[in-house]
Amino acid sequence: MKLKHLTFIVIGLFLSLFSNRVYANSSQDEEEIVVVDFVPAGRTYYYSPSPRDNWFMSMGAGVQTLFTENKGNAMFSLSMTVDFGKWFNPHWGLRLSATGGELRIRYPEESNILHYKNVSLAGDFMWNMTNTIGGYDPYRIVSVIPYVGFASNYAFRNPLGKTLSFAISTGMRFNVRLCRTVDLFLEGKVNILSDGYNGVVKSKRAEASLAMLGGLTFNFGGRKFGSYNPVSEMFAREALNAEVNALREEDNMIEAENATLKLENKRLKNELAQKPKVITEKPSPCDTHLTSAVRFALNSSVVTDEEMINIYNIAEWMKANPKCDVMVTGYADKDTGSEKYNKKLSEQRANKVIDILVKNYKIDSSRLKLIANGSTTQPYPQNNSWNRVVVFKSCEMK
């Protein structure tokens, strides 16, 4: 019997330490596992993301026996168990358990069998040895969990009288993961009892009950643990600060470019005002050169509040010229990103502008034609950052 138990323990330890994420690819509702090239040193702390996570309840059955003044071989009888507990982190948890059934011993002679019932209520401290030794893995199949605690044991329907004993409860549980919410468990449990628990006092220091149990564990709430590494958090904060500083520098550049554009726009207006008026044949309104342009930040398709005025101007022009269509052409600067990526980015920028014209200003989408030029052509070769833009061109309706 002892050799068989030792074999089970060795097999369980082997499986638990070397079993890895077999559910990572098969379960669609699991979060993506991200592998990074560099992980800063420092201790990782684990916690339950919510007080409702990592609760469990187990139900099972097995056999039990009592080691006492028994004559002859030990006799095993049916035992039932139920427990309820919570894992506070991947390494330890607490539970309350109730185990009971029938006990039989041969006393005072081998031919005389005493039958009585017993129930044990225990509070146990549980240690997930597999997570502690092998590292936390939320997808591990087999876990080895030793535990220790205190129990109150009550024996009744005993011809020798009712007895109550406070005991030390200890044992080992093997958890086998079946799915995200259900585990199979196998458990060996020992209660160290005071002498006389079976109603017979022979001046022994202690008696012991042994139960071999198996059943199912049902897990409630989330089953994963959050993690916190102070060192990696410090690295993350430094990276975010660097990114914020880069964005601020970019904003300053954009403001300077906007100021340059405003001065250029003012100069062009002054030049137009100074040109003499020439009476010519009135051209088609659809031949108008549309000067409005919508500028974007680096690697972005978000229209800022400052640029909304340019979309408003195009919308008002289209309402005033219902017989004209507009080609909406998106660009990206050639010094940033690949040609394929810039093509997609310019399309997203043009799409964003068209969505605002249609949804905010009720322009018929059939009057708008999207063109994504990416970075293959640059409308503003004198300043690369100006090419993060969407421009407009009018044309006759077909």
Image (cartoon, helix red, strand yellow):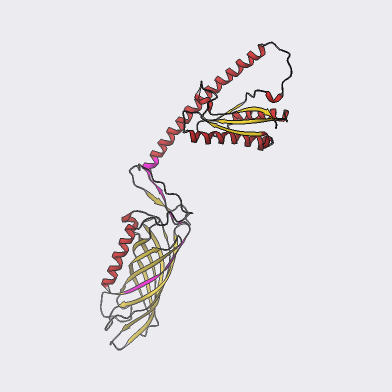
Q: Quadrant of the N terminus?
A: bottom left
Q: Would you say the magenta stretch is mainly helix, strand or loop? A: strand
58 in the magenta segment:
no
Q: Can residue 242 be spotted in the picture? A: yes
Residue occupying image coordinates x 38% and y 45%: 229
Write the residue at 65% across / 34% down.
Answer: 368
Image: 186 above or below 349: below
Q: Is residue 229 magenta?
A: yes
In the displayed structure, 207 sits above or below 41; it is: below
- In the foreground, 89 or 192: 89
Identify which residue is drawn at 41% across, 46% down: 34
Looking at the rendering, in which quadrant would you find the C terminus? top right
Residue 75 percent location from the top left of the image:
32, 81
Q: How many marks are shown on the rendered structure?
A: 0
Judge left or right: residue 65 versus residue 322. Answer: left
Q: Nearer the viewer, residue 384 or 340?
A: 340
Kindly give the residue lying farthest to the bottom in the view shown.
Answer: 111
Q: Is residue 19 left or right of residue 72?
A: right
Q: Which residues are magenta?
A: 209-233
* Residue 185 location (% of width, % of height): 39, 67
Q: Nearer the viewer, residue 68 or 14?
A: 14
Left or right? Give the position of 207 relative to 36: left
Q: Quadrant of residue 36?
A: top left
